[in-house]
Amino acid sequence: MRSGRCIKATCKASPPLVSQGFTRDAGRGPSLVRTSIMPPNVPDCPFEKRFPSQLVRDDAFFMSLAYNQAIEAWRQDEVPIGCVIEHGGEVIASAHNTVEASNDPTAHAEVLAITQAATHLGDWRLEGCTLYVTKEPCPMCSGATLMSRLKRVCYAVPDPKMGCLGGATDLNTLPRVNHHLELTAGGVLEDECRVMLQAFFKLKRAANDVAHANDSDAGSA
């Protein structure tokens, strides 16, 4: 079975979230319908999804699935950060950033995945779960990993500016925190995830430069 199908199957029990591009349909009562539309002028994503072997479910396997989520974010013109949560060797949650589509500053991959996982387990305490994410969590998401009682966090790319699990600071080492994470900081698909992030922002900057140049030309015409 390919990894993309694995995500779909294992996350089937988790209901869709409004912040992931779903909304309630007034004509159908409480049901949810997909509302996301591909944004115009999204730079083509030059990266291909990974299809790791299902037989070896190691850190590289689960990070590959998070990497695939990051590609989905790119295709929706979101910052390409993806996340999956593993429990008992199975993926119970998968998400990517949807900040732009939902106009929700909290719609980061980690927060969405944590909500999915808690719904799947029926418990806000995600004990025994490992969260895999393609970039070090920000202050908000780092706090969420601690508050949700995750067993472990594995991130691909350290973030010295905004990362709060070892990059800019480390919330996990606060002496009075009543929960501490096992942490794998960088190293797992680090190069691949960094290259994707750098390429995304490079293309976005180039697109903005072209747009500004066009605006200048139009103003002087």
Image: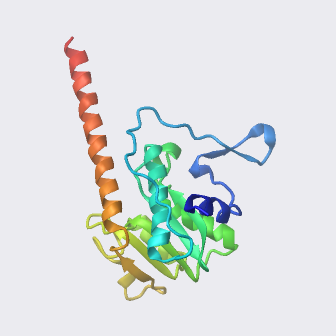
Work out whether residue 108 can be spotted: no
Q: How many marks are shown on the rendered structure?
A: 0
Percent x, y for residue 212? Answer: 25, 29
Q: What residue is rendered at 76% in x and 48% in y?
A: 31
- Quarter assignment of residue 67: bottom left
Percent x, y for residue 80? Answer: 41, 53
Query: Is 183 in front, or is 86?
Result: 86
Query: Is 74 in front, or is 28?
Result: 74
Percent x, y for residue 213? Answer: 22, 26
For residue 203, above or below residue 154:
above
Q: Identify the residue at the far top of this view.
A: 221
Q: What residue is rendered at 58% in x and 82% in y?
A: 127
Work out whether residue 52 can be spotted: yes
- Quarter assignment of residue 124: bottom right
For residue 106, above or below residue 211:
below
- Quarter assignment of residue 27: top right
Query: Is 143 in front, or is 188?
Result: 188
